[in-house]
C-alpha cells in the first residue's frame, strides 16, 4: 500500500485546491468554535461508523498543507472501504481548518483554506475538544475517530 498510497495521496494533497470540484467531507474552521455540533447536524448521514480528521499540519512528510490536507482523511477512509468493506456513506472525512504556516500554500490563489497563519492560541484546543464532543454527541461513543497527520506539537 505505501508504494501506491503515499505518493498518490501526497500529490493529491499538494494539488488539492487546483483540482477541487465539490466537497467530500466537512471543513470546520477555527472560526466555527461554538457551533461545531450545529455544523455536524447538517451532515446528511445519521449512521457514521468512522471519522478521520486532520488539521493538515504534517501531511506525509510534505509539511503544513493546511486545508489542502483533506486528501488524507479521504484517502484513509477509502482504505476503510477497500480493506474493511465499510460503505463510504458511513465514513466522514473532516479537516479542521486553522490556517497554514506554509507561505506558498497560503498565497496560492487556488488555496481553499483560511489564508492566515496557523492558529496556535488556546482556541485551537477548544476547537479539537469541541469537535470530539460534538462528534460523540451526534453519532455516539462507538464511532471511531482517527486523528491523522497532526503536527508533533498537537499529536
Image (cartoon, rainbow, N blue to C red):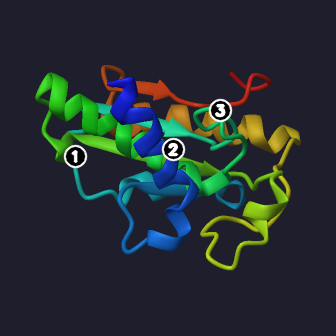
Query: Of tags 3 and 1, which is closer to the observer?
Result: 3
Sequence-wise, the earlier of marks 3 and 2 is 2
Ranked by sequence position, the earlier of labels 3 and 1 is 1
Please provide percent x and percent y for residue 86.
15, 31
Residue shown at the point (19%, 44%) measured from the top left: 88
The residue indicated by pointer 3 is 61
Q: How far is mark 1 from mark 2, CA to CA?
A: 30 Å
Q: Closest to the observer: 57 or 29?
A: 57
Alpha carbon distance from label 3 to label 1 = 34 Å
Quarter of the image that includes the C terminus: top right
Q: What element carries label 2?
A: helix
Q: Residue at x 52, y 57 (%)?
A: 27
- Is 138 on the left or on the right of 153, as rendered? left
Residue 100 percent across, percent down from the top left: 77, 53
Expressed as whole percent of the image width and height from the top left, the position of residue 18 reads 52, 72
- Disc 1 designates what residue? 46
Q: Decide: marks 3, 2 in contact (CB < 8 A)?
A: yes
CA distance separating discs 3 and 2: 9 Å
Asked if marks 1 and 2 touch (Cβ < 8 Å), the reply is no
Q: Which residue is drawn at 25% across and 58% down?
A: 44
Neighbourhood count class around disc 1 (C-alpha, 10 Å): few under 14, some 14–19, many 20 upward: few
Query: In the image, is 75 to the left or to the right of 44?
Result: right
Q: Is residue 67 above or below residue 81?
A: below
Q: Residue at x 45, y 34 (%)?
A: 6
Q: Is residue 39 shown left or right of residue 44? A: right
The quadrant holding residue 145 is: top left
Task: Determine if residue 123 is in view.
Answer: yes
Secondary structure type for disc 1: loop
Which residue is denoted by mark 2 in the rendering?
10
Amino acid at each position: 500500500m505505501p508504494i501506491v498510497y503515499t505518493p498518490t495521496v501526497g500529490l493529491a494533497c499538494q494539488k488539492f485546491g487546483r483540482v477541487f470540484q465539490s466537497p467530500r467531507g466537512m471543513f470546520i474552521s477555527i472560526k466555527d468554535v461554538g457551533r461545531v455540533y450545529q455544523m455536524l447536524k447538517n451532515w446528511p448521514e445519521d449512521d457514521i461508523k468512522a471519522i478521520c480528521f486532520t488539521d493538515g499540519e504534517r501531511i506525509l512528510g510534505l509539511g503544513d498543507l493546511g486545508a489542502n490536507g483533506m486528501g488524507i482523511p479521504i484517502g484513509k477512509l477509502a482504505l476503510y472501504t477497500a480493506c474493511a468493506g465499510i460503505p463510504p456513506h458511513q465514513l466522514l472525512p473532516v479537516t479542521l481548518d486553522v490556517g497554514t504556516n506554509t507561505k506558498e500554500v497560503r498565497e496560492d490563489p487556488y488555496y481553499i483554506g483560511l489564508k492566515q497563519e496557523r492558529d496556535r492560541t488556546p482556541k485551537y484546543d477548544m476547537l479539537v475538544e469541541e469537535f470530539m464532543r460534538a462528534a460523540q454527541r451526534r453519532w455516539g461513543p462507538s464511532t471511531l475517530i482517527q486523528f491523522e497527520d497532526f503536527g508533533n506539537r498537537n499529536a
